[in-house]
Amino acid sequence: MAGVEQRQNKSGGGGKKKEVKKETGLGLSFTKDENFGEWYSEVVVNGEMIEYYDISGCYILRPWAISIWEIMQTFFDAEIKKMKVKNCYFPLFVSPGVLQKEKDHIEGFAPEVAWVTKSGESELEVPIAIRPTSETVMYPYYSKWIRGHRDLPLKLNQWCNVVRWEFSNPTPFIRSREFLWQEGHTAFATKEEADTEVLQILELYRCIYEEFLAIPVTKGRKSELETFAGGLYTTSVEAFIPNTGRGIQGATSHCLGQNFAKMFEINFENEKGEKGMVWQNSWAYSTRTIGVMVMVHGDDKGLVLPPKVAALQLIVIPVPYKDADTQGIFDACVATVATLSDAGIRAEADLRDNYSPGWKYSNWEMKGVPLRIEIGPRDLANNQVRAVRRDNGAKTDISRVFLVEQVKGMLDKIQQNLFDVAKQKRDACVEVLKTWEEFVTALGQKKLILAPWCDEEDVEKDVKARTKGDMGAAKSLCTPFEQPELPEGTKCFASGKPAKKWTYWGRSY
Ligand code: 87F
């Protein structure tokens, strides 16, 4: 199978620790610092998040990954429902005429569109595209459904898959040819309402990253060059992967202005009987979120899951000795799980008798379970359990009398610590600079660059051209909403013209 070949071919590189894997069948052969790419592939597979598939760029998402997706989905879905957004489902297939209706928007993306050309052995009369996004699928119906101001706002969302036939280096979750996302598409009578919603959604995306995935992100606005073609302005949350020195767009919230309304004739009559055009937004986050989480928190023992998104927050492992009261230990494990489950903690016991406790420790560490509880003869005698944190390995003995409150406290601490450590690491990579020489040096050091910029499209194109190479060119990531002071007379790092704003730059995914 191609997927297997691909992985075997990959295993030729450096940074290997062969003996560990041979001995136990556990453990990783690559380290995060020495060979990040191979480490990542191995972690997502051995952590049981994905399985490689025989079509390049497509991956099987296993229950361990989908459960994370579902936890984020439950949160986000409830939040947008509070905002009166309704869920819907539009077809996967797009007719060619409709797809190409909005020319500006499809132009640059056309090579990535996948087409169905046959059914059985016969050629289709008209080939059918598979949605890469649903603007052109949905907006003809917005035109039909919106007549008067009473039909506004129209706020729809769909949870679905999309296909983009990428050619550059596929990576599980981060760049796959099919992925899962939500896409929200809304229409308003006024620009003010649209502007407000863009930021409300962006705040939910920040919340998913920072509060659920424990990943620090920067909210900001995309440059003209990076703005969605056919849109008015694009906002995003941007994350950073210290190991590779690359920025990564976490999610986007666009104000489309009235461009699509013009193309698709989405008009309405206001209270005074005057005709107007709607103002539209669209916004999305995808399964890429999960890849960013793996890259940011994972370590040389495997996945590290933040408690808020972990399907299993705690694993209880019996540690029986030959002559110990094995039944008593097993009963204590079952009772511990019952107590924790009743308190709303996602806990299970690993009572398999064909694996040693040591093997189980490694296995659950690989899968990133935030907290492990061990119960041995001494614990049983003292009516206590031993808790071991996945994030920092810290061990604590907990009396079973205070089990629930202590465990809750530890899970909160782990969640916070993951965020704090990730933020420290990210902040340590930020380089504030003002000249081209400093820029080139910082780029070579995998920094996240904050530089004063003149905000001219040609200058960004020039930065891209001047930094082109095997590692990929540098580009603007976003102009953060929180702007440091920009002293009068500050010059653009790239053009020397007067700077208008501070902007983040770097290589990116
Ligand atoms: C690939 C092929 C065809 C991105 C594509 O961000 C079209 C596209 O329109 C395309 N890749 N895009 C931009 C998607 C914009 C927008 N769509 C709705 C979002 C949020 C959700």
Image (spheres, rainbow, N blue to C red):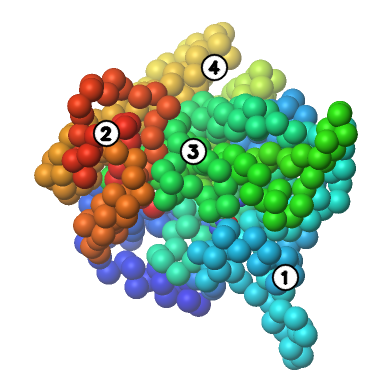
Distance from Cα at disc 2 to Cα at disc 1: 43 Å
How far from the left and from the top, in percent, is residue 272? Answer: 86, 29
Please tell me how crowded label 2 is: few (under 14), some (14-19), or many (20+) other residues with Cα within 10 Å: many
Q: Secondary structure at mark 2?
A: loop
- Whole-percent x and y of residue 5? 42, 75
The answer to whether residue 61 is left or right of residue 241 is: right
Local secondary structure at mark 1: helix
Rendered residue at 50%/64% (across/down): 108
**Left-right relation of 489 to 268:** left
Residue 340 appears at what percent x and percent y?
Answer: 62, 21
- Residue count near mark 1 (Cα–Cα under 10 Å), binned few <14, some 14–19, many ≥20: few
- Residue at image position (41%, 66%) is 168
The residue tagged with tag 3: helix, strand or loop?
strand
- Residue 297 sits above or below residue 26 on the image: above
Residue nearest the viewer, comparing 104 with 53: 104
Q: Residues within 10 Å of mark 4 (few under 14, many from 20)?
A: some
Q: Where is mark 1, residue-wise?
A: 97
Q: What's the residue type where badge 1 is placed? A: Gly
What amino acid does circle 4 point to? Lys
Residue at the spot of label 2? 499
* Mark 2 → mark 4, Cα distance in angstroms: 49 Å
Label of residue 236 in the image: 3
- Which of pointers 2 and 1 indicates the residue nearer the eye? 2
Looking at this view, name the residue that lies furthest to the bottom.
121
